[in-house]
Amino acid sequence: MTTKNIALEREARAWLKRHNGADEIINIVPAMEEYYAVKTYHLYTAYEAQPDFLGSILFDADNNWIYNGGDLCVNEQEQLAGFIVNYQERL
């Protein structure tokens, strides 16, 4: 079984359909450090002078992910993980 390589290497913004509340744009920032083949992405609110940190999503070599935070429900976590895994750079 072949897993897809995650192509998101730079900061990106994703539309998040919130479970409770207004939808919003989330800033996804790849962490500079990688430990033991784990890719980490930090999540922030976008377009604010003082963005709120919403947690992090960590991916292993097989693209299994885990959310480290308390601000996003499972559906919201899945939306952002899906965005990261399926990200394609615009030409």
Image (tube, rainbow, N blue to C red):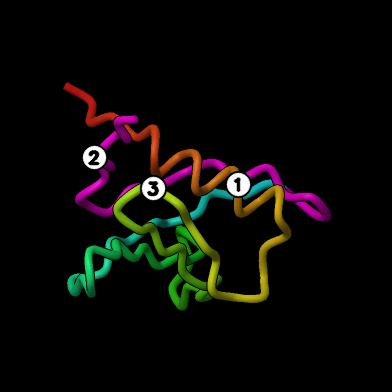
| Bounds of the magenta segment | 1-22
Do callouts 2 and 3 mark residues in contact (Cβ within 8 Å)? no
N-term-proximal mark, 1 vs 3: 3
| Label 1 packing within 10 angstroms: few (<14), some (14-19), many (20+) | some
Taking the image as shown, residue 22 lies to the left or right of residue 33, namely: right
Q: Position of residue 75 (x, y in %)?
A: 71, 48
| Location of mark 1 (residue) | 78
> Looking at numbered disc 3 in the image, what kind of residue is underneath it?
Asn
| Label 3 packing within 10 angstroms: few (<14), some (14-19), many (20+) | some
| Location of mark 2 (residue) | 7
Q: Residue at x 29, y 53 (%)?
A: 61
Q: Residue at x 66, y 51 (%)?
A: 76
Q: Quadrant of the N terminus?
A: top left
| Location of mark 3 (residue) | 63
Taking the image as shown, residue 69 lies to the left or right of residue 60, namely: right
Taking the image as shown, residue 85 lies to the left or right of residue 7, namely: right
Q: Position of residue 86 (x, y in %)?
A: 39, 32
- Would residue 63 be counted in the magenta stretch? no
Q: Quadrant of residue 85?
A: top left
Q: Quadrant of residue 5?
A: top left
51 or 60: nearer the viewer: 60
- Whole-number angstrom distance, CA of label 2 to CA of label 3: 12 Å
Q: Quadrant of residue 69?
A: bottom right
N-term-proximal mark, 2 vs 3: 2
